[in-house]
Amino acid sequence: MLGLLSSGFLLIMGLSTQEYEQYSVISGISGIVFLLIAGILSGSFISGDRIRANFATETKSDRLMRNRWLFIFSLIGAPNLIVALLLTIKYL
């Protein structure tokens, strides 16, 4: 919900003020930041032995909580990147 609200707000502001580039950059940066946080939480930026060590030492509840936050950050970041692409296309 938060991702849709923030991206919708940026889309409306970008279209109403016709400053497509400025709102495209804001939306793109926020989308990239949230997706990077999701990538860090997923463990996709570490090696296989580190993933195995983390998996062996974390509890099931910790893993579920980490996956929950991963999902939340992904849902916030993806709509912002889509809005950034839409505003960039509109700008061109």
Image (cartoon, grey):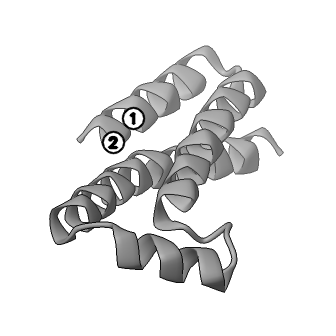
Q: Position of residue 15 (x, y in %)?
A: 56, 28
Quarter of the image with the N terminus is top left
The residue wearing badge 1 is 8
Residue sitting at x 59%, y 25%: 14
Label 1 SS: helix
Residue type highlighted by circle 2: Leu
Residue found at the very far top of the displayed protein: 17
The relative height of residue 82 versus residue 25 in the rendered view (above or below) is below
Q: Nearer the viewer, mark 1 or mark 2?
A: 2
| Residues tagged 1 and 2 counted as in contact (Cβ below 8 A) | yes
Residue situated in front as seen by the camera: 92 or 4: 4
Q: Position of residue 3 (x, y in %)?
A: 36, 41
Q: Position of residue 81 (x, y in %)?
A: 58, 50
Residue type highlighted by circle 1: Gly
Residue 23 vs residue 57: left or right?
A: right
Q: Gap in Å between the C-alphas at discs 1 and 2?
A: 6 Å
Q: Which mark is residue 63?
A: none
Residue 4 vs residue 85: left or right?
A: left
Mark 2 Cα shell of 10 Å, populated few (<14), some (14-19), many (≥20): some
Label 2 SS: helix
Mark 1 Cα shell of 10 Å, populated few (<14), some (14-19), many (≥20): some
The relative height of residue 25 versus residue 53 in the rendered view (above or below) is above
The relative height of residue 10 versus residue 88 in the rendered view (above or below) is above
Residue sitting at x 66%, y 51%: 85
The residue wearing badge 2 is 4
Residue sitting at x 64%, y 46%: 32
Q: Position of residue 23 (x, y in %)?
A: 65, 26
Residue found at the very far left of the displayed protein: 61
The relative height of residue 66 versus residue 24 in the rendered view (above or below) is below
Q: How many dots with numbers?
A: 2
Quarter of the image with the C terminus is top right
